[in-house]
Image (cartoon, rainbow, N blue to C red):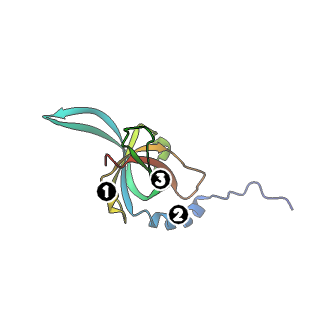
């Protein structure tokens, strides 16, 4: 008996039935933005932010932070994986151009206020959530 080639596997009904579980674990909140020109207000720099997306996310630090091997370089880089709902436009997140700010860390309050650089859109064909990776220089907050 031949396989039915016209049968859609990942239907909207199927996605709606499964995505509730991963979305229930998205208890953090993030802001993805693009930096505009930096201006000065007296002696304080003011950064203009253009919001790309804001919403709930599951925030998962990956691996142990690694130090840069250059002599005198104090950078300690932590990669962080963000899982966001299907509705998030991760295809619009640009590596090295967009930034992620953690507004609510969920169970990881140490990340609140951290600003990270989008490193890569690590999305696969995952039909129930979207993912991307950002890098955080933990030495600079």
Q: Is residue 26 left or right of residue 126?
A: left
Q: Measured from the top left, where is residue 131 in percent x and y? A: 50, 52
| Front position in the image: 59 or 138 | 138
Q: Residues within 10 Å of mark 2 (few under 14, many from 20)?
A: some
Marker disc for residue 87: 3
Badge 2 element: loop
Residue 66 lies, with reference to residue 95, above or below; the image says below
Q: Measured from the top left, where is residue 108 in percent x and y? A: 36, 63
**Residue occupied by mark 1:** 112
Q: Measured from the top left, where is residue 94 in percent x and y? A: 46, 39
Q: Residue at x 42, y 58 (%)?
A: 57
Residue 45 lies, with reference to residue 8, above or below; the image says above
Q: Is residue 73 visible?
A: yes
Q: Residue at x 67, y 59 (%)?
A: 9
**CA separation, marks 2 and 1?**
26 Å
Mark 2 and mark 1 lie on one chain; the one further toward the N terminus is 2
Q: Are marks 3 and 2 in contact (CB under 8 Å)?
A: no
Mark 1 and mark 3 lie on one chain; the one further toward the N terminus is 3
Tell me the quadrant of the picture where the N terminus can be found.
bottom right
**CA separation, marks 1 and 3?**
23 Å
Q: Is residue 89 left or right of residue 5?
A: left
Badge 3 element: loop
Residue 65 lies, with reference to residue 93, above or below; the image says below
**Residue occupied by mark 2:** 19
Q: Residue furthest front?
A: 71
């Amino acid at each position: 008996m031949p396989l039915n080639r016209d049968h859609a596997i990942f239907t909207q009904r199927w996605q709606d039935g499964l995505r509730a579980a991963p979305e229930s674990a998205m208890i953090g909140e993030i802001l993805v933005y693009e930096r505009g020109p930096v201006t000065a207000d007296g002696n304080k720099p003011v950064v203009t932010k253009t919001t790309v997306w804001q919403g709930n996310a599951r925030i998962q630090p990956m691996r142990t932070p690694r130090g840069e091997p250059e002599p005198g370089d104090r950078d300690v880089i932590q990669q962080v994986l963000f899982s966001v709902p299907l509705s998030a436009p991760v295809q619009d997140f640009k590596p090295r151009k967009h930034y992620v700010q953690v507004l609510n860390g969920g169970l990881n309050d140490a990340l609140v206020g951290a600003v990270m650089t989008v490193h890569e859109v690590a999305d696969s064909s995952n039909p129930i959530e979207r993912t991307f990776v950002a890098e955080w220089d933990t030495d600079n907050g």
